[in-house]
Image (tube, helix red, strand yellow):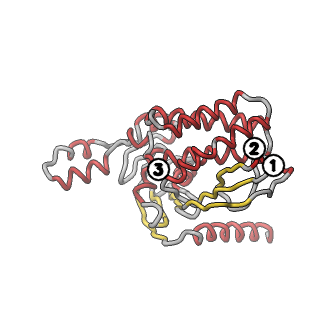
Amino acid sequence: MKKIYLLVTMGLFSCATVFAQIKNAETKTFKVKAKCVSSKEIIESAGNQKRISTVSYNTDEGIATIKFDNTKTTAEAILKKIALSGFDNEQYFAPDNVYEKLAADCKYTRDKKAADHSVHSNSTHNQSKIQSHTQTLHEDHEMHADDKSDLVLNAYFNMKDAFVQADQSEILKQATLFKKILDNTLKETPSSQNLTSLSNLTHKIIQEKDIKKQRKFFAELTQPMYKLAKNAKLKSAVYYQNCPMFEGGSNWLSKDSAIKNPFYGNQMLSCGSTVETLK
């Protein structure tokens, strides 16, 4: 009994800690069309972002309570992510193709008639509001520029962590995922020299079998990745770090301030320093 009490207490403390980490907090509630058991996890995962936002979904009432740092995001941006996970809400309709992929027990009655009817309103204010509230997010499903940068950065960080671990199977897996994200983004911005360079270098990492050579290509990724991070609207700090030993001095980007060297791994894990913090 004591163990159960302790676990519950720790769980509550953990939840309270997550909420406490959000600065400039603002809380709002919205209706979301979701009743299945798995919807709670899907919706909360879609909206939760460390130190920026948390979502608590009440399946019985169909209410999402959103707490967020209003200097870093908006309730609308979070609701958009929830819609992109397949669930219509007060602000946005989910893309049809995403909705269709939901499990059978997660399907719900969709009502676009009122929205479609009001599109014909002569009021400029209403038209603007309707466009915001009723768009199906097909264009947003392809993501805004900031979201694209965030996606590319996170995929890069995963690949960097694989190099830290010196796990070649994981390096191949993360490099392949990274290139897929780059290539999908390039379809929308084919003129981006940074993305093209990143894609070409990642292809070399995937083809190479020698981890030292892979690390050389990874080091070359730094400059185009640095430019991308420098120009992006970052949601959290990115650390530009340097290893003075590898190839006469090589850099990498990290979402953690602690040094975890991707060029030597456990051999010299803490070798290096942060030379710039991007915010």
Residue 265's disc is: 1
Which sits in the foreground, 206 or 47? 206
Residue shown at the point (62%, 71%) measured from the top left: 16
Q: Return the disc, 1 or 2, that comes first in the chain's sequence.
A: 2
Residue shown at the point (49%, 52%) measured from the top left: 232
Which sits in the foreground, 276 or 70? 276
Q: Return the disc, 3 or 2, that comes first in the chain's sequence.
A: 3
* SS category of the residue bearing label 2: helix
Q: Quadrant of residue 209?
A: top right
**Which amino acid, mark 2?**
Phe
Q: Return the disc, 3 or 1, that comes first in the chain's sequence.
A: 3
Task: Tell me: residue 23, above or below residue 62.
Answer: below
Are dots 3 and 1 in contact, CB under 8 Å? Answer: no
Residue furthest to the left: 122
**Which amino acid, mark 3?**
Asp
The residue to which callout 2 is attached is 163
Query: Residue 39: where, in percent of width, then height?
Result: 53, 48
Query: Residue 58: where, in percent of width, then height?
Result: 50, 58
* SS category of the residue bearing label 3: helix
Query: Residue 66: where, in percent of width, then height?
Result: 47, 62
Q: From the viewer's perspective, is 246 left or right of 183?
A: right
Q: From the viewer's perspective, is 262 left or right of 198?
A: right
The residue to which callout 3 is attached is 146
Residue shown at the point (81%, 47%) measured from the top left: 264
Q: From the viewer's perspective, is 254 left or right of 3?
A: left
The N terminus - image quarter:
bottom right
Which sits in the foreground, 21 or 189? 189
Are dots 1 and 2 in contact, CB under 8 Å? Answer: yes
Assess disc 3: are there few (<14), some (14-19) or many (≥20) residues with their C-alpha within 10 Å of its C-alpha.
some
* SS category of the residue bearing label 1: helix
Assess disc 1: are there few (<14), some (14-19) or many (≥20) residues with their C-alpha within 10 Å of its C-alpha.
some
